[in-house]
Amino acid sequence: MIRNLVGKHFGPALLVAVLALFCSFSTKAQTIRDLPPPPPAPTPKPTPTPAPPKDEDFDIVRVSSNLVMVPVSVVDAKGEPLRGLQVNDFRLAEEGKEQQLTEIGNPDEVPLDIAILFDISSSVSQKGFFAFQQKAAASFLKQVLKPVDRAAVFTIADEPKLFSPLASADVAAAKMLSIPAATSAVPTAFYDTVVAAAKYLVQNSADRHRRVILVISDGDDNFSSVVKDLTVAEYRASQKGQSTSKAAYQNLLQRRRLAVLEVQKSVQQSDAAFYSINPGGPSVHLNQISTRAQEAMASIAESTGGTAYVPEAERDLERVFSEIAAELRGQYLLQYYSNAQAAGTQFRRIAVTLPAHPELRVRARQGYYPKSAVKSEK
C-alpha cells in the first residue's frame, strides 16, 4: 500500500520536474538567440604614409634627368678621325661653366638611328648620276649600320614623304634603290622635309640613341611653307621685269635666314647631327640661289656637329660617304650631368675643346634644348 502511495505521488512530481527542466533550457536557448551579434573586431589604424622627401633629398634622381650625351668628332690636319683620346683630354663648358665629364661612351655600344633624305626634285634628279647616288647611299647604309642600328628614308619633292620607316640596313638600302626619279619638273620642299625628319626621330628614336640626319640634295628650296611666299614674290617680280630694290631684297634675305634658323632649331631639338652631300659640285658657287642654299646647309651642319660636303666630281661621292661612315664609327660620346641651376626651356650653349691638342679639329653640336622644352613643343 505504501509502495502504491509513493508511486502515485512520485509520478506526477517527476513529470513536473522534467517539464520545469525543459522550460529552463528553452528559456536559455531563446535568450541566447535574442542576444545581438558580437561587435566587429577593432580595425587597426593604418600606418601613415611618410611624406615624400624634399627636392634636396632626391639629388641622384634629379641630376640623372640632366644627363647629356654629346657626340664629338676629332680629326687631324688631313681630316682623318683621331682615336685614343681620354676623358681628361676634353674640356666641355655649358653656358660658360665647365662641366665634369663622367665618361666617354663607346659608339659601338650606342645604337644609331639615321634619317636619310633623298632629293628627287627636278633640281637634282635631272643630273646624269641619279642611279649612282642611290647605289652610293645604299652602300653607305650597309657600311655604317650595325644590326642594332636603323635607318629611315625620306624623299624630297613638293612635300615630305616617309618612303621607308626606321628599319635595318638591308631593308633601308633596298628601299633606297627603289626610289623613282622625277620625270618632270617637281617643286622642292627641302626645309619641310628636314623638319619632318627631325620630328620623326624625336617620336620614333629612343632617347639614348645617337641620331643623324643625312641629306643628298643641293638644298635649294622653293616650296616649303616657310619660304614659298618669298619664292613667289621673287618670281613674280622677275616675270614683270622688275628689279627688286636693295631694301626689299635685304628683307627677303632676312626672312630666309629666319626660316633657316627655324629649321636649325628643329634639328637641334631632335638631338641629331646634320650632314649634307651636295651633288651639284663646284657649280653651286655659280649663282646666288645655289650658293645661298649651300650656305644654309653648312650653317645647320655646323650648329649640330655635322658637316656639309660638296664633292668635286661623281667619283668623289663614294669617298664622302666613306668619310661620314668613318666619322660616325669613331665619335667620342662625351657624357656629363648638367649643373644648370634652373630647369628652363631655353637653348643651352656648349663648347668642347682639347686644350692640350690645339692642332686637332673638334666638331660637336653648339648646344641643346632640355628634354622638357622638346616635349612641350611636340
Image (spheres, grey):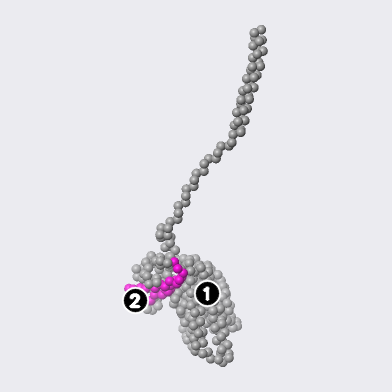
Which mark, by number, is residue 11?
none
Q: Is residue 362 magenta?
A: yes
Residue at the spot x=51%, y=72% of the render?
A: 198
Image location (x, y in percent) of residue 363:
41, 75
**In this image, 101 relative to 26: left or right?**
left
Single out the residue that lies furthest toward the bottom.
241
Judged from the image, the secondary structure of the residue bearing numbered disc 2 is loop
What residue is drawn where x is 35% and y is 70%?
89
Query: Who's the residue at 43% across and 71% down the image?
Result: 348
In the image, residue 5 above or below residue 233: above
N-terminal-most mark, 1 or 2: 1
Give the class, few, some or many, for how many residues have Cα within 10 Å of label 1's Cα (few <14, many ≥20): some
Q: Amino acid at mark 1?
A: Val
Q: Nearer the viewer, residue 258 or 35?
A: 35
Kindly report which numbered mark, 1 or 2, lies closer to the viewer in this rendering. 1
Say whether residue 170 is magenta.
no
Q: Which residue is mark 1?
A: 195
Left or right, 38 with reference to 319: right
- Whether 7 is drawn above or below 337: the answer is above
The residue that disc 2 covers is 358
- Locate residue 108, reporting x and y percent: 44, 67
Question: Who's the residue at 60% across and 31% down the image?
Answer: 31
Q: Nearer the viewer, residue 330 or 347?
A: 347
Q: Amino acid at mark 2?
A: Pro
Q: In the picture provided, is 153 more to the left or to the right than 324?
A: right
Judged from the image, the secondary structure of the residue bearing numbered disc 1 is helix
Q: What residue span does the magenta drawing correspond to?
A: 343-369
> Is residue 131 visible in the rendered structure shown here?
no
In the rendered image, the vertical position of residue 57 relative to residue 165, given as above or below: above
Q: Is residue 31 above or below residue 57?
A: above
